Image (cartoon, grey):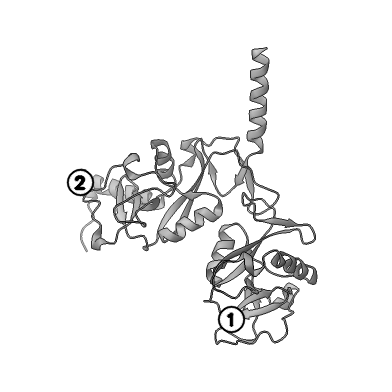
Amino acid sequence: MKFILKYVALVVCFTFIDGVKFRCDYKYTYLGWLKYHEIPATWYDARLQCKFEGGILASPTVPGLKTLMLDLFCKPEIFTGIHATFSKEQYYSVDGIPLAQIPHEWESNEPDNKNDSERCITLNSNGKFSDARCDEPRPYICFRENSQADVNVCGTLDSEYHFESSTNKCYKFHTTPRTFARANFVCSAEGGHLAIINSDEESRVIAQVFAKYPASKMIGNFQKDFAFIGFHNWGESADWTTIHGQSIQEAGFAKFTSGQPDNATTGEYCGSVLRNGLLGDLGCENHFAFICEKSPDYPLLCDNIKVIDESNHNHDCTNNAQEKQIESVSNKNKTNPKHIVPAS
């Protein structure tokens, strides 16, 4: 009987694991999901990117995680989630673990807090730590630990995305105001993009989404009857184009509300939608609510059945290979003088 119960428990367990999925651009390991971002970002943007993707900015809080992180990058150093941005010298990971509880070894002459401005910690390719300025861009790794949470019908862990059958898209209304550029950043990190209206039907759907968020639900001093969506005019008044490169006419919806676009304050080059589902123009650098949309099948999802062995993470670090080749030639020259290249 005990054997049968144990077998049933294992079947239930593996059935559940089979259903746990996450973004395929993350690699699954025995500790969780990892993604290396090669394009450098400031520490602040790295933290947000990881958050909106559904993870956190990775920190080598345990030896196993450190090993996995080191195997993902070739650059001299990457940002970790360890920071002292709240108060000087008080270092914590973004998930609240103090530096004193994180196994670490400092790089030679580190930390030095150069110019009293280094509040973030990097993990160097040799496994040691350095302190660095948070606003100087570096590559980074996002991490999502193993959990029982699974993606929803919108292909995301974010429950604020809601599927609309009439457009076969998912939408999220962001009440925290941001500039057009930052709104675009958020939607992209979430796996979507600023909403693009492609039809009268979608205009009605957007109006219904907007109606769920009266001004009373939005905190802050900003105009609450407009929201950024995904079109702009490149600074040319007649060139209204979606963020995907189509004219709004080609995209399928080009209906501005009465009196719009008016460029009321010079520089209203970014697109918006009003509560009636029609279009308007806004200043790109001003802060407004915004609407993201995403396809239910993007980004692609993978399950966590296959645990990727650490050795499978090995990749070709071109710079490292070149350095080894140079070192090899140098060593050969030292031991065999006839191979020495004469100075020009």
The x and y percentages for residue 141 are 45, 50
User: Residue 306, relative to residue 255: is it above or below?
Assistant: above
Quarter occupied by residue 195 = bottom right
Q: How many numbered discs sit on the rendered protein?
A: 2
| Local SS, label 1 | loop
Q: Label 2: which residue?
A: 334
Can you say which quadrant of the picture contains the N terminus? Answer: top right
Can you say which quadrant of the picture contains the C terminus? Answer: bottom left
Q: Nearer the viewer, residue 142 or 310?
A: 142
Q: Amino acid at mark 1?
A: Tyr
Left or right of 321 in this view: 169? right
Q: Please name the residue shown 33% across and 45% down the image.
A: 99
Q: Amino acid at mark 2?
A: Lys
Left or right of 206 in this view: 288? left
Q: Classify mark 1: residues with Cα within 10 Å, few (<14), some (14-19) or many (20+).
A: many
Q: From this viewpoint, is residue 75 visible?
A: no
The x and y percentages for residue 189 are 56, 58
Point out the residue furthest to the front here: 216
The x and y percentages for residue 135 are 37, 63
Q: Please name the residue shown 66% across and 18% down the image.
A: 5
Q: Nearer the viewer, residue 236 or 319?
A: 236
Q: Label 1: which residue?
A: 269
